Image: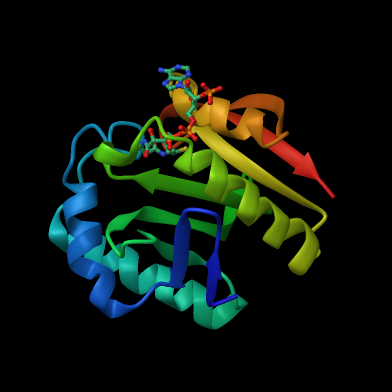
Amino acid sequence: MDHFTTIRLTAERLREDHLADLVALHLDPEVSRYLGGVRSAEKTENYLVANMAHWDQHGFGLWALRTKEGAFAGRAGIRHILVDDIDEIEIFYAFKREFWGQGFASEIAAAMTDIGLLQLALPSLIGVVNVRNGASRRVLERSDYLLERSANSRGEDVVIYRIRR
Ligand SMILES: CC(C)(COP(=O)(O)OP(=O)(O)OC[C@H]1O[C@@H](n2cnc3c(N)ncnc32)[C@H](O)[C@@H]1OP(=O)(O)O)[C@@H](O)C(=O)NCCC(=O)NCCS
């Protein structure tokens, strides 16, 4: 679980030394557009600490993603999320802009869905996406997630997709 590979990506369990890559990723306004806006280095440091704690507590969480050549490409994960006070498990992902439009998110979403449903044997997984984030919605649809409902999360209009085992 700490490490897995897909055809074109390697995923490594989040570590402290991923901080600089994550800070740069979160400082890109296009990347952060539907992620609550650009995050300061301090906010990303808190994010890293929280996501490392998630690993310690649950045995799964956020991975840093690299191309086979070793370049940092983005991040993706499986984590607990409270939706209307219900404990759900979501998949989430973000890539550096230069890697968009090549099927990387679809590749990692499919791999994480298999991990969640088959290895972790979870009954279902969700994706929570800003209603206007067409690319991310498409990624979930391509991974066979079904549109469940609209909701409001932290003041944003979102849609919730779900896949069941
Ligand atoms: C969303 C994101 C992860 C997609 O990554 P990606 O590697 O480019 O995605 P893929 O190439 O696997 O697939 C994107 C799909 O969306 C489609 N697409 C791209 N832009 C779109 C748009 N504006 N509206 C609708 N569909 C769009 C692509 O055509 C592709 O579908 P197709 O394969 O059927 O042609 C990437 O844009 C990103 O990192 N965004 C910033 C972070 C983010 O928003 N994360 C999701 C939070 S829920």
Name the residue located 23 percent from the left edge and 32 percent from the top edge. Answer: 30
| Any part of residue 29 in sight | yes
Give 49 or 59, whichever is nearer the viewer.
59
- Disc tally is 0
Give the left or right position of residue 12, taking residue 162 as reference. left
Q: Residue furthest bottom?
A: 56
| Any part of residue 89 in sight | no
Give 154 or 94, whichever is nearer the viewer.
94
Give 102 or 135, whichever is nearer the viewer.
102
Name the quarter showing ligand 1. Answer: top left
Quarter of the picture containing the N terminus is bottom right
Q: How is the image coloured?
A: rainbow
Q: Position of residue 35 (x, y in %)?
A: 35, 39
Give the left or right position of residue 64, taking residue 142 as reference. left
Q: Position of residue 44 (x, y in %)?
A: 24, 60
Name the residue located 23 percent from the left edge and 49 percent from the top edge. Answer: 26
Name the residue located 56 percent from the left edge and 32 percent from the top edge. Answer: 139
Query: For residue 84, which quarter of the picture?
Result: top right
* In the rendered image, the vertical position of residue 1 relative to residue 78, given as above or below: below
* In the rendered image, the vertical position of residue 106 relative to residue 4, given as above or below: above
Q: Position of residue 59 (x, y in %)?
A: 60, 78
Give the left or right position of residue 73, taking residue 130 as reference. left
Query: For residue 117, which quarter of the picture?
Result: bottom right
Query: For residue 97, which quarter of the picture?
Result: top left
Name the residue located 40 percent from the left edge and 72 percent from the top edge. Answer: 14
* In the rendered image, the vertical position of residue 160 relative to residue 81, given as above or below: above
